[in-house]
Image: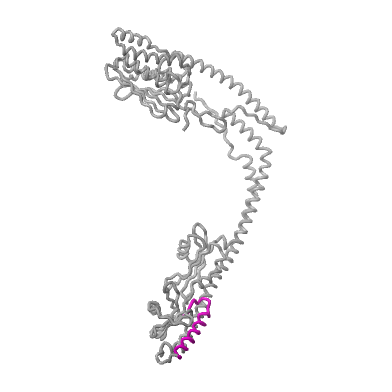
Amino acid sequence: MEKRTMPRDKQPRWGIYKKLVGSFLLILIPIYVISLWMNQQGADVVRQEIAKSMQQKTDYVMTSLENEIERITTLQQTFINDADLNDLSIRAATLTDYERTKAFKDLQSKIVMLAESSKLIQDVFVLMPKLDKRLSAKSRFNVDTMDRGEYESLLKAKNRLFNPVYYKGRLLLPLGYPSATRSQYLLVIELSSEKIGREMDVFRSYEDNVTYLTDDYNQATLYAYADGVEAADRIQSLEQDGRGELTIDGMPYLVFSKRSDMLQWSLRTALPENIVLDPVYSIKRWYGYLSAVSIVIVLIASLMIFRLIHQPLKKLVTGFRKVEQGKLDIVIERREHDEFAYLYTQFNRMVAKLNELIQEVYEKTIYSQKSELKQLQSQINPHFLYNSLYILYLMADEEDYDGIRILSRHLGDYFKFLTHNKADIIPLEQELNHARVYGAIQEIRFSNRISCEYTVEGDPSEWQVPRLIVQPVLENAFIHGHEHTEENGRISVRVRCEHEALTITVEDNGNGIDEEKLAEVRKKLTLRHDETETHGIVNVHRRLGLLYGSASGVRIDPVAGGGTAVTLRIEARPVDRGEEGEWQLASYSGRR
């Protein structure tokens, strides 16, 4: 009949505390939703008004620039017919030196007045190609030589009402006489890009603003400003966007634009949404504070009820879970004398009784294991002693004194290890040295028909192992693996030292093991509690299992091409040190 197990208790999906919180939230959510809708409606109205105000500011800045530049061009057209300017440019050769000097001074005064007539004008100058002269408002009544490159660039300007020319980073407005050829003279007004940019200061009151003023006709940038880093990326994003919204560096921006048909200039400005709409966000923040306070009140009210009912129950459930994990040293206390105090008292009595019963079973198990371990260890005896003594006799009979000396030294080391070392757990290096001594004795016994090879990976000094676990496996390889080997017998001992496991493999190239015998040995290895007498590999397997658990032991495998491989594996075991669960290695002594 199939055995059925009781399902493990699970944490309730909806505990009392969650249900209390959920009930309060069901009452508050409808009120919250209605309030949120009303707040959103008000926020949308405020948002629209703020956006409208910002658009009006953008329109005002562009309109101001348009009006001011229109006024400047009107003054320029009026000034183009000035008598002194005509006299100097057209009939300068007929003027006396006095008349020419007086005309230059009068013209200088007039262009200075023109330059000071607008805050956007940087300079006003006249180019007179026939005289090769350049008269500027900044020249302080000095007449300079005309720059031919500047003059040629200005002549290429389009013949229209507003025709700005960009020359060496300067914004110039040329007007020539006569208008058809402009060959007599050019009256040029230089606009200040810096002063034009000051008109945008109305937007600088906002942090992280981006402002971009372009000349669409000439495809030139008149003004570009971005508060903060990545200015080029921000301006480029704004250049590709019109009015509306865009995101720069993850921050949402509101974009406002205005274009002047007369100037063919476009002004775009982008302001961070969280700054422009700060009044809206302020309302949302207060609404968020109110929501947070409401949730806190719900949690506190639920917690008060929770402490009265659910917390004592949860404490009791936690106690049962600790008992389930094997922790029987817990005691649950309660100050109040109520129903939970009675439950806690009964729980503590139950845990105490379980602890007593488990302690009794544990002690019996430990005593049984120690007794069995001593019995298994006592079965390991040097049963090959008589063979070794007989070999010594033959060597003495043949007067092989060197062989007697070598074999006697090996036998001495062998029995010294057995008689002087009484520890159950010894360093791995000592165990391997003992195996080498035993292998050397067997090589002499088999007249060097069989050789042993040893390979060690890792650091064996960091491992401790039970004594006499390698010799029985090595003995089995000599006796059963090479029982009929006449020559070229080989036994390989490979040791691999890792952090969490130690593996020792003894492999021979002997006769191998048939399937029936292999199945029989493997069956004995699985019968850990077999009370029959055990020897050799089964003995070693039983010891490793008792000391290090079921993950450790012996495995036997046939080798392709003949031979047998016996693998000893010792798993390092975690030792529980309280709730931290500190990882320690029961048989691993090194630190890495």
Question: In the image, 320: left or right of 530?
Answer: right
Observer-nearest of 131 and 484:
131
Can residue 38 be seen at all in this image of the molecule?
no
Q: Main secondary structure of the magenta part?
A: helix
Position in image of residue 526 (x %, y %): 43, 20
Which residue is at 37% across, 24% downward?
A: 505
Position in image of residue 563 (x %, y %): 32, 21
**Residue 112 vertical position relative to residue 418 in the rendered view, above or below:** below
Q: Which residues are magenta?
A: 98-124
Which residue is at 33% across, 10% downward?
A: 391
Can residue 449 be seen at all in this image of the molecule?
yes
**Residue 433 vertical position relative to residue 132 in the rendered view, above or below:** above
The image quadrant of residue 577 is top right
Observer-nearest of 97 and 93:
97
Which residue extends farthest front? 97
The image quadrant of residue 507 is top left
Position in image of residue 277 (x %, y %): 58, 62
Position in image of residue 78 (x %, y %): 48, 85
**Residue 47 vertical position relative to residue 297 in the rendered view, above or below:** below
The answer to whether residue 107 is magenta is: yes
Question: In the image, 584: left or right of 435?
Answer: right
